[in-house]
Image: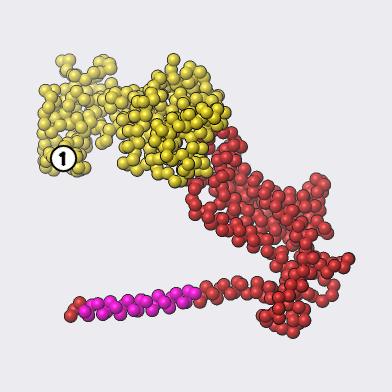
Amino acid sequence: MKTLKIEDLSKNFGSTEVLRKINLEIDEGNFLVLLGPSGCGKSTLLNIIAGLETINEGNVFIDDYNVSKVEPKDRNIAMVFQSYALYPSMNVRENMIFGLKQAKTSKEKIEQQLEKVSKFLQVDQLLERKPSQLSGGQRQRVAIGRALVREPRIFLFDEPLSNLDAKLRVEMRREIKKLHQQLKTTVVYVTHDQTEAMSLGTRIAIMNHGVIQQNDTPENIYNKPSNTFVADFIGSPSMNLIKGSLKESSGEISFTANGSNFEIPVKGYEFKDKSNLSNKEVFFGIRPEHIYFKKSNESDFEVTLRADLSEYIGHEQIMTFDYANQEILAKFPSTIKIELAKETKLYFDLTQTSLFDAQTEERI
Amino acid sequence: MQDNLKSSSYQQLEQKSKYTNMFLRWFLYFVLILFASYFIFPLYVMVVTSLKTMEEIRQGTLLSWPSGLNFDSWAVAWGGRGYGAGDTFLRPYFWNSIKMVVPAVFFSTLIGAMTGYVLTKWRFKGDSWVFLFLLFGCFIPFQAILLPMARTLGALGISNSIVGLVLVHTVYGIPFTTLFFRNYYVSVPTELVKAARIDGAGFFKIFFKILLPISAPIIVVTVIWQFTQIWNDFLFGSTFSFGEAAPIQVALNNMVLSSTSVKEYNVDMASAIIAGVPTLIVYVLAGKYFIRGLTSGAVKG
């Protein structure tokens, strides 16, 4: 049984296609993050799961039950919003029990739930306050509390941390992570922040233009991006994509960047399909953090590049190098001194590379 | 030595700026008092004239102070002279106006709030067109709809009645009240409605439990606006009612214009003040609350 299953889901607003043939499955207890740039359809998808938006095509199943035409309140879900959406005229207590009262829950049960949840979230001292008298973090807690008291099957979070300042955001992120570890409820979480996605999710679905680009564990998303969009979207600075082509000579496959004269051996790379590789136009992908200043593995590949630019950001520095007229970035500890406009020896970690077809932009 | 020089010149500058500031302040007060008296002057004339006897009015000037507090003309304006035919006085018409203005303000505000709520929180296909047509209602010259409206009221059997006037004022108030509430609700996050839907609240529950309780500032604005409009209306009142069903503004007009003998300026002034007092009271009472509502800033959850 899948806690949540989405089948061939499509959605348009007028003539604009927002979601195209979305298929998604979540197992019990998972924390799924929908990640993507603004306008990719992730919030619409969440609203559809909640039942706040209608569907043009396809179905949504919760616990194998088709809820496509079921009212939001009957879907056994709860949602936390970006603006918290606490009812301004009600105090914290009324806010938290509003849903239970609508569902005609017994008084004792309501009190019991309220006490349990408010203690758990440490808002039991704030019950008589109005939302306007709470700080950002407290409002966020109350909003989560309002979702918790209903004991839903699935929690839906719509960018819940984007209204908080940087410091509080990191704190609340940890709290949400703890919350999930303790409760083990299934979560669907929408964000455009990759750090949030990576640190919270047990699975991440990266979306762009209404299509899921990759739905995988955070590790696989980072290490084995399935296309150039994912490779570019995840990581800061993002993955270097060097344009070039593959060559095959006597069974050895190597990559040569356009305009460059040296070959990078890629024999250790796990190709999906080993045929037709020769002369294939590809992007060679390597993350800035996988370019080293000192050789650390036997397989590291040595290149000599000219340093053009240095960005110092405290704990590290981001250097820009020229690789056959293509810019590539590398990340080093800030203790390393590299002179600008000079050739510098660097080492590519060949166990951490990705190759993408230049035409389809898919991983090969 | 140099330091001394410096500090004395600073003192001079300080003195100078003190005088400039003082002058500007006094100038400001002067201008404010001038404008205030300009606005208050007609009211002064009305009040003094209403307190004078006809004798005093004939002999004194417009500005002269009354000989004493003589409320006779107020009593005449409100309750009449006590003889039968041809005695027009305001009391019954005042209550006519109250009976008209209270339900008309209530219904137009409630309906405006509802339409504003639907137009912002329950968007539907073509809703912006509906809003556009409603806006047209704000610009219709009311003279243009007098005839069709008279026919409609006749067909409904409520011409020349308070009910008819309530209907007319409600209908023509809706464009304005809708505009007010729509613009207010646009700034209320739609996520509130979404959250309430997930919590299981329906259309009316969301409106009455979540949105109306945070609408106090705009309700006050709307009530002030509608009350003033409807209370001061003369056109609809004089067209759709006559005789005993007339609202106070029509009665005031009849009273002032239909006096057969001498023009009684003191009674006229007292009547005019009586007819204007309710709007003044609404401003004073609601205006205070209005500012409180604005400054509490409780809209953001």
Please determine whether, in this image, residue B148 is positioned above or below residue B66: above
Q: Which corner quadrant holds the C terminus of chain A?
A: top left
Instruction: Residue B28: give x, y in percent of width and height.
Output: 48, 74
Residue identifier under label 1:
A334
- Residue A161 falls left or right of residue B201: left
Label 1 amino acid?
Ser
Q: Chain of mark 1?
A: A
- Coloration mode: by chain
Majority secondary structure of the magenta segment?
Answer: helix
Where, by quadrant of the figure, is residue B4 drawn? bottom left
The magenta stretch spans residue B6: yes
The local crowd at label 1, few if under 14, some if 14 to 19, many if 20 or more residues have their Cα within 10 Å, is some
The foreground one among A296 and A32 is A32
- Chain letter for the yellow part: A
Where, by quadrant of the figure, is residue A253 drawn? top left
- Chain letter for the red part: B
Instruction: Residue A233: give x, y in percent of width and height.
Output: 31, 32
Q: Residue shown at 61%/48% (left/top)?
A: B178
Please determine whether, in this image, residue A283 is positioned above or below residue B11: above
Q: Is residue B191 visible?
A: no
- Residue B278 falls left or right of residue A169: right
Q: Residue shown at 88%/66% (left/top)?
A: B84
The magenta stretch spans residue A23: no
Q: How many marks?
A: 1
Residues in magenta, as a range: B4-29
Instruction: Residue A105: give x, y in percent of width and height.
Output: 55, 27
Q: Residue shown at 51%/30% (left/top)?
A: A110
